[in-house]
């Protein structure tokens, strides 16, 4: 069974304090790993797709990396506006309909 | 350009009542999905439609039905609402080709008393 575990559940940072969020996954043939950002009262907003081990993607203060068993979302010098819930999801290679399996998310709070 | 629009945004029902959640997209995507999101749990797939004219069960389909009305619209129906169905419901779409991300609406917050 495909499974995604995110850690920590919650993370509090001071503005400018860099850190990483973890997404561990078990999937029968990875087709893609997706990172989303979710603000309170909103739907998830797509950030990155990673396809193969060793791949990295960057967007402003965020960088996502992928290994064969996990992905990290590195946040460099975060600002209060980076506060959100970050979701990780995987897509299995043989899944019909491009279904995703989501982790429970990491709630990030950045204080000024 | 609205993307994915869900209606209503909020709803309160009594146990046993029925209701239909609506989802419409203007992204010309082939695939559409219904999820529920509960505290401490990830998004869980209820039903999906890989393309117009097809629907399939996801992880938690019991108590729900869906209709893919046309390429743009995908509705979720609760025939006899139960308190366990209190949740936030999200509709999502994707191009239908592998590796394409899903794009989400802003959800319907449903409370069942």
Image (cartoon, coloured by chain):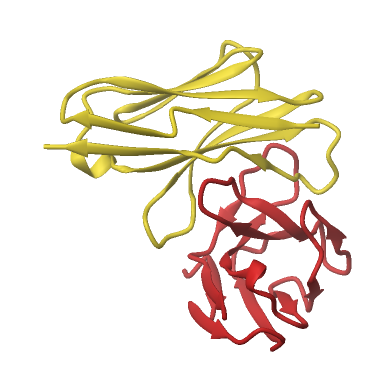
Chain colours: A yellow, B red
The location of residue A2, given as percent across then percent down, is: 76, 32
**Is residue B30 in view?**
no
In the image, what residue occupies the spot 11% across and 37% down?
A112
- Number of disc labels: 0
What residue is drawn where x is 69% and y is 42%? Answer: A100
Image point (75%, 39%), residue name: B98
Side (left or right) of B32 relative to B40: right
Instruction: Say if A107 sits above or below B110 in the image.
Output: above
Q: Quadrant of residue A24?
A: top right
Q: Position of residue B109 (x, y in %)?
A: 51, 71
Q: Residue at x 62, y 59 (%)?
A: B36
Q: Does residue B34 sit above or below A37 in this rendering?
A: below
Percent coordinates x, y for residue B32 in the rendering = 71, 61
Q: Nearer the viewer, residue B3 or A15?
A: A15
Q: Is residue B109 left or right of residue B51?
A: left
Q: Is B80 placed left or right of B100 in the picture?
A: right
Q: Is residue A94 above or below residue B45?
A: above
Position of residue B9 measured from the top left corner of the image (x, y, whole percent): 48, 77
């Amino acid at each position: 069974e495909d499974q995604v575990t995110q850690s920590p559940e919650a993370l509090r940072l001071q503005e400018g304090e860099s850190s990483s969020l973890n997404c561990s996954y078990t999937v029968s043939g990875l087709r893609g790993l997706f990172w989303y950002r979710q603000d309170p009262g909103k739907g998830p907003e797509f950030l990155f797709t990673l396809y193969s081990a060793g791949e990295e993607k960057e967007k402003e203060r965020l960088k996502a990396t992928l290994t064969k068993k996990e992905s990290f979302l590195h946040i460099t010098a975060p600002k209060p506006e980076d506060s959100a819930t970050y979701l990780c999801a995987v897509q299995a290679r043989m899944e019909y309909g491009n279904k995703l399996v989501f982790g429970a998310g990491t709630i990030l709070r950045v204080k000024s | 350009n609205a993307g994915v629009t869900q209606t209503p945004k909020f709803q309160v029902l009594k146990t046993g009542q029925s209701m239909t959640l609506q989802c419409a997209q203007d992204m010309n995507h082939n695939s559409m999905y219904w999820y529920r999101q509960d505290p401490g749990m990830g998004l869980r797939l209820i039903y999906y439609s890989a393309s117009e004219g097809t629907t399939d069960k996801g992880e938690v389909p019991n108590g729900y039905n869906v209709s893919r009305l046309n390429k743009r619209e995908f509705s979720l129906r609760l025939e006899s609402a139960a308190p366990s169905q209190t949740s936030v419901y999200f509709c999502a779409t994707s191009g239908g080709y592998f590796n394409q991300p899903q794009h989400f609406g802003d959800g319907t917050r449903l409370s069942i008393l």
